[in-house]
Amino acid sequence: MRADPSSRLPVPRRAGGPALSAPGRPAALARPGAGTPDRSARRLWAWWLVSRAVLVTLVVTDQAFGMQQSVLGDLHIYAEWGRGLSRGEGMPTGDDRWQYPPGAAVVFVLPDVTHAYLGLPYRAVFVGMMVAVDAVLTAALVRRSIPAAGFWVAGLTALGPVALARFDLLPAAAAVAAVLALAAGRFGRAGFHLAAGALLKIWPVLLLIALSRPPLRSPGRSASIDPPPDPPPGRPTGRFPAPSPDWLRLAAGVLCAVGGLAALFALTGWWRDAFGFLGAQQARGLQVEAVAATPFVVAHMLGHGTAPGYSYGSLQFDTPLARGVATACSLTEIVVIAISALWWWGWARPPAAADGAGRAGVLVGRTLALLLVVVVTARVLSPQYLVWIMALVAVWIAMARPAGSGGLTVPAGGPAAPVPAGGPSWRWVALLLICVVLSQVVYPWRYNDVVQGRIMMSLVLVVRNVGLVTVCGWAWRAAAGSRPA
C-alpha cells in the first residue's frame, strides 16, 4: 500500500508567523515544545517575576548599589501630600511641586489610609500597588500578544526602579485598557478607562483627539471609506452624522469616571483648587533632561552658561533664554495637537478597518505620534514619562501582531515604514529601548555627573535625546502610512 503523497508535501508557512499544520494534523501538535504559546507565556511570567524582584530590591535598598540619586524622593512627597489629604487639609496647591490633575489625590491617599488602618509602611503599599498594576497590565498583554507583553516586560526593566517609585503606571494601564476595550467594541468601558487615565495624568486625552470624527459605527450604516449615502427624509443632514450608539456609550463611560471623582471630591472637600496644578506647570523652566534643554546641557558641559538649579521639584535651567525656549516648546505642542485634531476630526476620513483591532491600531499609532511630540517638546522630561510611550508601543504591537501571529516584521521600506498590520518596526522599537536604557543610566545612576557638566554623561543624555527625536519622526511616518489590515 502506497503512502499518502500529501504526507510528503512541504508544510506552508504564513508570512511572519509559524508553520501551518499539515493536513489532518491538529495545529497544536504541528510545532510542539518551546514554541507553544503556553510555554512562551510561562517563560515570560518567570522573566517578569525575576525582573520585578530586581526592581523592587533596587527601590527598597535605594542607593545601596551606587546610585547617585535616590528614587524615593517623590515617594516622600507623595506621603506628605497623602497625610494632608486624609486629614482634611485639601489639595496641596500651595506647594509648587503639586503639578498633577485632581485624580492623583486618590492615588496618594490610598497608601496613607492603608498605613493608618493596617500599619503598613507607605512605601511598601505604594510599591505594592504599582507591582499589582504592572501585573494586571502584563496579563492583559499576554492574552493579546506574547511579543507585546515581552516588549513591555523588557521595557519596564530597562527603565529601572523609577518605574515602581512613581505612579505613571496607573495612567499607562488605563490607556492600554481603553485601547483594548475599543478593539473589543466595548465603548463604555473605553470611555471610563480613558477618563480615569486623564484624571491622573492629562496625556491619555490624546486618545480622544486621535480617535477621529464619528462615526465609529452608525445605526444602519457600516464603516466605509466611501461617502455616506444621502440620508432619507427626516434624517439630519450635513457633514457629521448623528451620534452613534457607540459614541454615546463612550461619552457615558467618560461621564461615569468624571462623575465618580466629582462625587468623591464633594464628600471630602477636595474640590477646592482642584485645578490649581495648571499654574505650576506654566511657571516651570527647562528641566535638565528635557530635549529642548540639550543646547544648555552642551553649553554647561563646555563650561559656558549657568548650572541648573532646583525649582518646582526638579533641577532645571531657569535663565530668561531657557524660559523663552520652554514657552516656545509649549506653543509647539499646542499647535501640533490643534492641527492634528482639526485634520482628524474635520477633514480626514475615518479609517476603514475589517475589525476593531485594525481601528485600534490606527488609533494607537496616531496617539503615540502625538504623545512623542508632547514628550520631546515638553519643558519637563522625567524618566517615568517613558512608561507612557512604552505602554502605547506595547498595545500597538498587540493590535498589529495578535497571539499566534509571530513577532514583528521589518518591512522593506526601512525602519520608519509600518509593518503590514499597522504596527511599529523592530528597528525603531529597538532604538526606543536603547533610549530607555540610557535614561536609566542618566537617572538615577549617574545624574550628578550630568548636573555637574561631566562630559561622558552629558553626551549620553544628548544621545538619548537625539534618539527620542528620531523615534518621534519614525512614529509620525508610521502613523501616517499605517492602514488597518
Image (cartoon, rainbow, N blue to C red):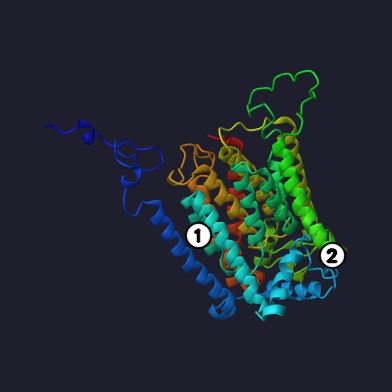
Mark 2 nearby-residue class (10 Å; few <14, some 14–19, many ≥20): few
Q: On the image, numbered disc 2 is attached to which residue? A: 267
Residue 38: where, in percent of width, then height? 40, 54
Q: Residue at x 76, y 51 (%)?
A: 256
In primary-sequence order, the first of circles 2 and 1 is 1
Q: Between residue 460 and residue 253, name the one nearer to us.
A: 253
Helix, strand or loop under label 1 = helix
**Callout count:** 2
Work out how far the residue at label 2 is from the one at label 1, CA to CA, in angstroms.
42 Å
Helix, strand or loop under label 2 = helix
Q: Is residue 95 above or below residue 330?
A: below
Residue 320 in view (yes/no) = no
Residue 233 in view (yes/no) = yes
Q: Amino acid at mark 2?
A: Leu
Q: Between residue 152 and residue 446, name the one nearer to us.
A: 152
Residue that protrudes farthest toward the left in the picture: 1
Q: Nearer the viewer, mark 2 or mark 1?
A: 2
Q: Amino acid at mark 1?
A: Ala
Q: Is residue 217 left or right of residue 60?
A: right
Q: Quadrant of the N terminus?
A: top left
Q: Is residue 181 above or below residue 159?
A: above
Q: Residue at x 67, y 64 (%)?
A: 167
Residue 453: where, in percent of width, then height? 65, 69
Q: Between residue 383 and residue 359, name the one nearer to us.
A: 359
Q: Which mark is residue 154?
A: 1
Residue 441: where, in percent of width, then height? 56, 67
Which of the 4 image quadrants contains residue 240?
Answer: top right
